[in-house]
Image (cartoon, grey):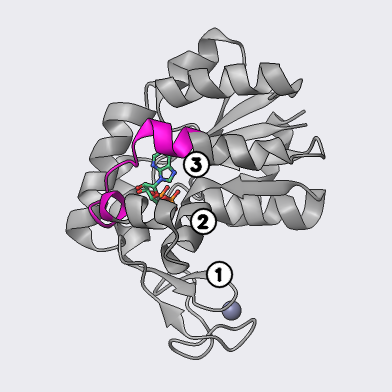
Amino acid sequence: MNIVLFGAPGAGKGTQSALLVERMRMKQISTGDLFRAHVKGQTPLGVKAKSYMDAGQLVPDEIVISMVEEVLEDQQDQNFILDGFPRTVPQAEALESMLKRKGLQIGRALFLEVPMSELMGRLTGRRVCSSCGATYHVTAKPPKAKGICDLCGGILEQRKDDHEEVIQSRLDAYTRSTAPLKSYFADRGMLREVQGMGETEAVYARLTQAMK
Ligand code: ADP
Ligand code: ZN
């Protein structure tokens, strides 16, 4: 089954996607990761996206949509996770018509529910391995050696947009533009809300249950 995974920044989309990839052999399509790769590679797309990302704003719909369209173009297997896309109603509408053209379908839109009061702490404490992308948290999931990835020995970094003022903008953008997707997917019978608080494994169990 193909799924959309959505929720506020810090809700745990990336963590849960990684588990789905590992255990269910799904393929993760994360627009955030794709943009970060473009920024790192200084591609024309990366140059366009960077200023929005650094400010915690959404990249304009037409840029995101054409990027996703390209990725879906050579999408063979029917077992993918859209992580971080769609994030606005126009993106959802564009997705619907893209999928129709390609004969693909989304089975479920899974919403990871986490209270706003929890998110700031999750994001300011997040650290990411600069080599393998594994994520940590300074108090909730610290690495064995400070600043070093347990898995690969890489250096842990703080994402540029994981600083307080930028996080606030991301949360505002979420409330304004992404939260309305809940009713969009509910209207189509695709929405399942999954409690995102608690142990990673407990969230994963609820998530996979909601995919059945
Ligand atoms: P988070 O969900 O934690 O905010 P992501 O890694 O998914 O982080 O995205 C990082 C940034 O990339 C966003 O703040 C935004 O600027 C941009 N971005 C990613 N996906 C989208 C999207 N679907 N629409 C617009 N901008 C996006
Ligand atoms: Zn690592």
Kind of residue at badge 3: Gly
- Tell me which numbered mark, 1 or 3, is placed earlier along the sequence: 3
Q: State yes or no: Cβ of the residue under disc 3 lies below 8 Å from any atom of ligand 1.
A: yes
- Answer whether labels 1 and 3 touch (C-beta < 8 Å): no
Q: Which residue is mark 1?
A: 133
Kind of residue at badge 2: Asp
Q: State yes or no: Cβ of the residue under disc 2 lies below 8 Å from any atom of ligand 1.
A: yes
Q: Is residue 122 left or right of residue 144?
A: left
- Answer whether labels 2 and 1 touch (C-beta < 8 Å): yes
Q: State yes or no: Cβ of the residue under disc 1 lies below 8 Å from any atom of ligand 2.
A: yes
* Label 2, label 1: how far apart the Cα atoms are: 10 Å
Residue 97 on image: x %, y %: 60, 17
Residue 146 on image: x %, y %: 44, 89
Report the image quarter containing ligand 2. bottom right
Residue 37 on image: x %, y %: 50, 62
Kind of residue at badge 1: Gly
Q: Residue 57's quadrant in the figure?
A: top left
Q: Which residue is mark 2?
A: 33
